[in-house]
Image: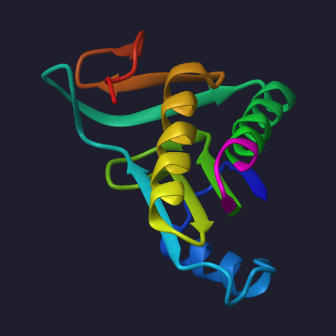
Amino acid sequence: MKVEIRDTNFDPWHEARLYQKQYLNQQGKYGATTVFIGTMRDMNEGDKVSSILLEHYPEMTQKHLEKIAQQALDKFEILDVLILHRIGKVFPNDAMVCVVVWSAHRAAAYEANRLIMEDLKSKAPFWKKESLEEQDRWVEKNTPG
């Protein structure tokens, strides 16, 4: 399991391949890999958004993401989990989150990935401030899954 919060842009496909190649000790045991990549979009609630500032409490957020990953490992028959999440200033089309799950079969990989993302979007301690043309505003709720 790897959980990392980053303040710089990253290539989620490269990171998934790198982790799978270098750190996944389950070579030959997985038949399914699910990947969720969340990117910043340039519109929200009908307004044009030029960037988002993602804030967090480092220790609390890291601990929460690790807990989500461990819950998925405990609940589903999966082999490993990779979670990467951005903080700081993020621009349209930048990756904000990447969740990768490896398992022997696809059902467990899909279910675990969804559990992680739904918890991450609804409970993880991140705060988003959108930059609009006229003003900045805090995001009060996430979009439903």
79 lies above or below 83: below
**Residue at the location (68% across, 42% down)?**
75
72 lies above or below 93: above
Which quarter of the rendering shows the N terminus? bottom right
**Residue furthest to the top:** 140
**Residue at the location (40% across, 13% down)?**
141
| Nearer to the camera, 76 or 12 | 76
Which quarter of the rendering shows the C terminus? top left
* Left or right relative to 13: residue 46: left
| Nearer to the camera, 32 or 59 | 32
Estimate the x, y position of residue 120 in percent, counting from the top left: 57, 32
Estimate the x, y position of residue 98 in percent, counting from the top left: 53, 55
Check residue 77 for magenta coloring: yes
| Nearer to the camera, 71 or 145 | 71
**Which stretch did the figure color magenta?**
73-78
Residue 138 appears anywhere in the view: no
Estimate the x, y position of residue 142 in percent, counting from the top left: 39, 21
Q: Quadrant of residue 61?
A: top right
77 lies above or below 96: below
Check residue 75 for magenta coloring: yes
* Left or right relative to 119: residue 72: right
Q: Quadrant of residue 43?
A: top left
State the colouring used for the structure image. rainbow
Q: Quadrant of residue 94?
A: bottom left
